[in-house]
Image (spheres, coloured by chain):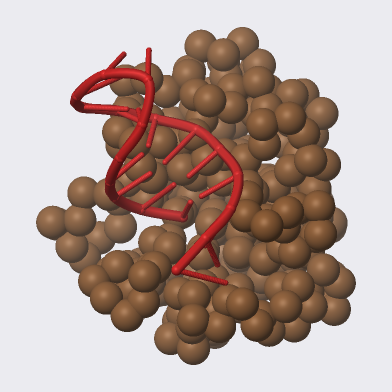
Amino acid sequence: MKIATFNINGVNGRVRNLLAWLDAARPDVVCLQELKTSSATFPLAAIERAGYGAIWSGEKSYNGVAILARDQLPLEVRRGLPGDKKDTQSRYIEAAAHGVLVACLYLPNGNPRPGPKFDYKLAWFERLIAHAASFATRAEPVVMAGDYNVVPTDGVADIYNPRSWLKDALLQPESREAFRRLLAQGWIDAIAEQHPGEPMYTFWDYFRQHWQRNAGLRIDHLLLNPAAAKRLKASGVDRDVRGAAKPSDHAPAWITLKAARRTSR
DNA sequence: ATGTCGGCAAAATGCCGA
């Protein structure tokens, strides 16, 4: 069972990239972020032709999240985080697929900082922490995957060099502290757990030849509750996707889970 | 401060957000 997360940075502009990656990587469940399109213009037909069912929450120009499942329609559990009725940004969707509860999230970037965007980021984080607490220790496997817009540490596993990012919202102590508090509920950061000390970047911005220089950041994460962590087999980043023609500025990150143990009667 | 993208409105360039 393979679960992946991919900030596609405009799903309609990158249908070909998406389909090529789906065909090569063959994930069972996919979380997409930054669709950058209204719900009505989500490219469902192409995704269905590739063998995936999908649910999505679109928004014109900005944000937007989707969950894809191979050979099945994800069973939607919720869209949008509770806690702020006035928040209309499409950043969260949750579904059951292939026996796993999957949350797909696009945490606010938070720049420029300080300011209302950074405040929104932290407030959204608090809502996520509150909601995640409700299923962190559930008996069934839960995976929270997406673009967290947080570089967890200054270590080389997470960033090539923090120097030019020190004032960026992605590295702020408040952002990192919120991420740590989320993990403290019992979540495992799968890639950090399996690849300590190894550069595992998922994002290289389009500026200053960052991709060519491997000047990347690890901001896309898959968090596993204990039931899912028990089944964790492998994890990685499909870096080659970032090197393709007209790429997203992110690469997909993924985990594989061992088959569920049959429950005894 | 800068750099480069995607999407979109309003018209081939400028803005926003990242």
In the rendered image of this protein, does residue A238 appear above or below residue A122? above
Tell whether A111 sits left or right of A201.
left
Residue A81: image quadrant is bottom left
Q: Position of residue A51 (x, y in %)?
A: 65, 17
Please state if A99 lies on the left or on the right of A241 as rendered: left
Percent across and percent down for residue A196 are: 83, 77
Identify which residue, A169 or A126, lies in the foreground: A169
Q: Is residue A69 left or right of residue A104?
A: right
| Residue at left offset 59%, top offset 31% | A69
Identify the hue of chain A: brown
Which residue is located at x 71 percent, y 73 percent? A159
Residue A73 seen by the camera: no
The x, y position of residue A111, in whole percent, is: 39, 68
Chain identifier matching the red colour in the rendered picture = B
Of residues A231 and A216, the one drawn nearer to the viewer in this rendering? A216
Picture quarter with the N terminus of chain A: top right
Q: Residue at x 54, y 54 (%)?
A: A146
Residue depicted at 82% across the width and 68% down the height: A199
Residue A12 higher or lower than A137, as above or below = above
Report whether A203 appears left or right of A84.
right
